[in-house]
């Protein structure tokens, strides 16, 4: 992939393009509102200078009505602009979130490893929110603020050019003061964000690890840590609030001083007959509009800058492409093939990064119905081997073949459909036991589910629930014990008789007797399935056809339990350490 910094996959403008009509009509309506607003002070000047001066009630009523009508039209168009802007803004947010979610789901494990969960969450929630806010502000302000600013300036100059010279001093002064205060606020805002992240992290860590915290009596330590982070956050927030609170008074002082000056010089102009009283009031009104436009524009700049930064972060995510793709002409899997379920590793090498090889030169054939054990110390590469079968990762060199065809030649979905996988960390999803059991096969019948529950030795406890398969599963399966969770995840993988079963340390929370029953049931009911059992216990794989012994990425030996006990020193050591009676 090219690392070209300018390459773009994501741009807010392309999403805006999907809602052209709303994106056009929101600023258009705002523009009409602005024009209406611009004429109001001028009409007011006419009412004062002509209507009131000549005591012409009719004139006052007609022009008053015109002013009211303009206000009314302005309000209607303002409401329409809000509506169109809100529709575009929320739909764009929805589309970006959907696209990010879909993109993340398409990425393979290799790409997902590059991003932490927090960062993915932040990009899907906070960054999209910033973009949404940016688009909303742009749609509403892009015509309004500049039109009002230029329009008011032009109207003011038309009313009195000499008096307008005051703007040469006031406008740059206003811009300078706002820019300076905003700069302080921006720094504080970044600090607040970091400190808020810190407090959130402490809260999250404390909540997820609440049992550990209590077991180690660390509540006081955790509370102190939180208090400190919270105090730190609040003091920065107070600083931010202080700066924020002086922004308006400072602007107001400058504007009021300017108004005094305008009254003074305007008064002189009125006295010498160069300016009418009504026009002076209109002039001051336009000046008020100009100053509020400057504030609005500076806010807009801040929001757009934030939106741009968020857009960059989302673009970064979209630039990462899925390396595990479907082939153009995928091979169909034939479930009736007598070879169905055969797995072969041919001179496989694998690494997560260029620096360290994780699996070195693995060759192995597993025939349908075989049980293959994978054993080795922690971090030796056991999970890495089995993760190559469903193509969570691709080999660095060599081939993984299923039914004598390279896994890369199958459609990824077809390939994963033939595999029943129990990951090392059992995870269940919120819903019912049934909804979790239907993951591999959405139309699984009750008999199929019950069969899987029986094989996985989960039936005994599931049948005790009055609501049986409809029994509720909390998020992550937190309402089950570790062993129950593990048995349910095994059952989930077995529904629909997969041709290949992968149990990655799946029986670590099961007692020896249950573990043995599980293996016996797989042998009996899923006799045609090729089963990979990753484990740290030799007893779990003593009846396996072949056992891969791996140590630090090196394939030490492959053989049956008895063969390995005879010739493989590492296997003997593992076996003896687990079976020797301790001598005091
Ligand atoms: N996603 C990853 N990115 C980079 N390195 C990884 C990744 N997953 C694992 N590793 C590294 O690869 C090596 C093998 O890891 P693997 O998960 O295959 O070990 P394991 O034998 O399954 O260990 P355990 O028994 O603890 O589950 C380890 O050194 C680990 O640090
Ligand atoms: Mg592992």
Image: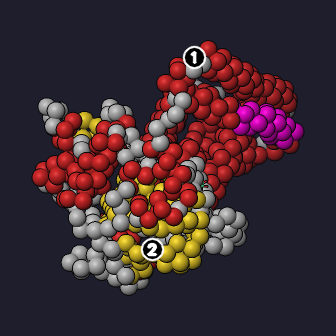
Relative side of 206 to 154, left or right: left
Ligand 1 falls in quadrant: bottom right
Provide the residue designation for mark 2. Answer: 364
Tell me if residue 189 is in the magenta stretch. Answer: yes
The majority secondary structure of the magenta stretch comes to helix
Q: Which mark is residue 217?
A: 1
Query: Can residue 74 be seen?
Result: yes
Residue drawn at (52%, 72%), measured in percent from left and top?
Answer: 362
Location of residue 156 in the rendering, given as x and y in whole percent from the top left corner: 73, 43
Location of residue 573 in the rendering, given as x and y in whole percent from the top left corner: 54, 51
Residue drawn at (36%, 66%), measured in percent from left and top?
Answer: 545
Residue drawn at (56%, 65%), measured in percent from left and top?
Answer: 556
User: Which image quadrant: the C terminus?
Assistant: top right
Relative side of 165 to 129, left or right: right
Q: Secondary structure at mark 1?
A: loop
Q: Earlier in the sequence, mark 2 or mark 1?
A: 1
C-beta proximity under 8 Å, tags 2 and 1? no
Compare residues 349 and 274 and report the one nearer the observer: 349
Stretch of the chain drawn in magenta: 169-192
Q: Would you identify the image quadrant in which residue 272 lies?
A: top right
Compare residues 117 and 440 and report the one nearer the observer: 440
């Amino acid at each position: 992939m090219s690392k070209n910094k300018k390459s773009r996959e994501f741009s807010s403008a392309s999403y805006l393009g999907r809602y052209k009509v709303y994106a056009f009509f929101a600023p258009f309506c705002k523009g009409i509102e602005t024009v209406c607003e611009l004429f109001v002070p001028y009409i007011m000047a006419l009412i004062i200078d002509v209507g009131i001066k000549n005591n012409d009630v009719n004139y006052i009523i007609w022009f008053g009505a015109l002013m009211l009508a303009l206000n009314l039209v302005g309000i209607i168009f303002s409401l329409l602009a809000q509506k169109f802007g809100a529709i575009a803004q929320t739909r764009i947010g929805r589309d970006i979130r959907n696209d990010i979610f879909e993109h993340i789901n398409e990425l393979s494990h290799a790409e997902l490893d590059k991003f932490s969960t927090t960062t993915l969450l932040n990009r899907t929630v906070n960054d999209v929110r910033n973009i949404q806010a940016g688009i909303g502000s742009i749609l509403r302000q892009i015509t309004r603020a500049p039109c009002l600013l230029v329009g008011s300036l032009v109207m003011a100059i038309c009313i009195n050019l000499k008096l307008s010279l005051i703007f040469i001093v006031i406008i740059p002064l206003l811009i300078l003061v706002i820019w300076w205060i905003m700069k302080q606020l921006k720094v504080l805002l970044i600090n607040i964000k970091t400190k808020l992240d810190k407090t959130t992290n402490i809260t999250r860590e404390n909540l997820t690890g609440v049992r550990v915290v209590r077991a180690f009596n660390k509540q006081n330590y955790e509370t102190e840590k939180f208090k400190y982070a919270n105090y730190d956050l609040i003091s920065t927030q107070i600083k931010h609030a202080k700066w924020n609170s002086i922004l308006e008074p400072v602007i107001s002082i400058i504007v009021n001083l300017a108004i005094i000056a305008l009254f003074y010089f305007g008064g002189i102009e009125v006295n010498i007959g160069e300016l009418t009283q009504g026009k002076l009031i209109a002039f001051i009104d336009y000046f008020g509009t100009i100053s509020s436009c400057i504030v609005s524009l500076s806010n807009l700049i801040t929001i757009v800058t934030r939106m741009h930064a968020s857009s960059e972060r989302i673009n970064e995510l979209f630039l990462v492409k899925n390396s595990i793709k479907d082939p153009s002409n995928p091979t169909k899997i034939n479930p009736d093939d007598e070879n169905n379920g055969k797995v072969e590793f041919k001179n496989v090498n694998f690494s997560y990064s260029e620096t360290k090889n994780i699996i070195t030169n693995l060759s192995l054939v597993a025939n349908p119905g075989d049980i293959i054990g994978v054993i080795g110390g922690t971090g030796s590469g056991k999970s890495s081997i089995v993760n190559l079968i469903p193509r969570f990762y691709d080999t660095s060199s060599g081939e993984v073949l299923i039914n004598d065809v390279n896994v890369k030649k199958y459609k990824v979905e077809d390939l994963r459909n033939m595999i029943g996988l129990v990951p090392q960390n059992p995870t269940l999803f919120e819903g019912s036991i049934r909804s979790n059991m239907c993951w591999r096969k959405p139309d699984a019948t009750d008999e199929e589910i019950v069969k899987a529950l029986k094989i996985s030795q989960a039936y005994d406890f599931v049948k005790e629930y009055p609501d049986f398969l409809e029994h509720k599963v909390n998020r992550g399966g937190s309402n089950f014990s570790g062993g129950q969770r593990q048995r349910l995840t095994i059952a989930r993988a077995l529904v629909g008789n997969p041709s290949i079963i992968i149990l990655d340390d799946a029986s670590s929370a099961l007692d020896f007797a249950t573990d043995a029953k599980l293996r016996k049931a797989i042998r009996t009911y899923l006799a045609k399935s090729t089963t990979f059992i990753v484990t740290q216990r030799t007893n779990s794989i003593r009846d396996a056809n072949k056992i891969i012994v791996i140590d630090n990425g090196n394939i030490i030996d492959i053989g049956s339990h008895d063969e390995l006990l005879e010739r493989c020193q590492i296997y003997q050591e593992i076996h003896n350490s687990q079976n020797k009676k301790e001598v005091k």
